[in-house]
Image: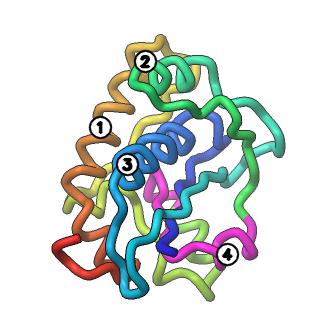
Amino acid sequence: MPSVLFVCTANICRSPIAMGLFEKMFNDERVESYSGHQPWIVDSAGTWAKPGRLVHENSRQVSGQRGIDIEAHRSQPVSAELLEAFDLTLTMEQGHKEALRIEFPQVAKRIFVITEMAGYDYDIPDPIGHPVDEYEMVYRDLERLLTAGRERIEQLVGIRSGS
């Protein structure tokens, strides 16, 4: 099955939103891979995550208003085992990508900033400590990037075009 891991810092704001949004966008319809129609495996983690923390209330609210339930997700730190289990890792910031590529060189070629999927080069700002409006902006930006970057994402995990 194709798989993608989203990574931010604490794994309570941006990456859980991206995970839930991706799952809704990509798993609402089956994608055709080389082995047939299979759902995506999707998860999220953090470079500085403390294990077991709840997703931030504003992230849950913004996602929940759109029918995306990320309530059950608990934060988890990035590990070699986790990275090796996924076809593709998408980070929220260039610094995340650089740190992970240095620490885990065995999977470096599978780590990208999410904005790269749509042909851009910028970081997704961390909304922690800001009003819910900032979470809304993060959500909308991630939705736009995943829509525009779908073909590139599928290409990177080996899914044939025209799925």
Q: Quadrant of the C terminus?
A: bottom left
Residue 120 against residue 16 in the figure, above or below: below
Of callouts 4 and 2, which one flags the residue occurring earlier in the amino acid sequence?
2
Q: Position of residue 56 (x, y in %)?
A: 63, 25
Q: Nearer the viewer, mark 2 or mark 1?
A: 2
Residue 107 against residue 44 in the figure, above or below: below
Residue at image mark 1: 141
> Residue at 65% of width from left, 79% of height from top?
84
> Label 1: few (<14), some or many (≥20) within 10 Å?
some
- Give the colour scheme of this rendering: rainbow
Q: Nearer the viewer, mark 1 or mark 4?
A: 1
> Label 3: few (<14), some or many (≥20) within 10 Å?
few
Q: Amino acid at mark 3?
A: Asp
Q: CA distance from mark 2 to mark 3?
A: 17 Å
Q: Amino acid at mark 1?
A: Asp
Discs 3, 4 touching: Cβ within 8 Å = no
Judged left or right of residue 48, residue 38 is left
Residue at image mark 3: 28
Provide the residue span drawn in magenta: 79-96
In terms of secondary structure, where does tag 3 sit?
loop
* In front of the other: 26 or 143: 26
Discs 2, 1 touching: Cβ within 8 Å = no
Residue at image mark 4: 103
* In front of the other: 61 or 116: 61
Q: Nearer the viewer, mark 2 or mark 3?
A: 3
Q: CA distance from mark 4 to mark 2?
A: 37 Å
Q: Amino acid at mark 4?
A: Glu
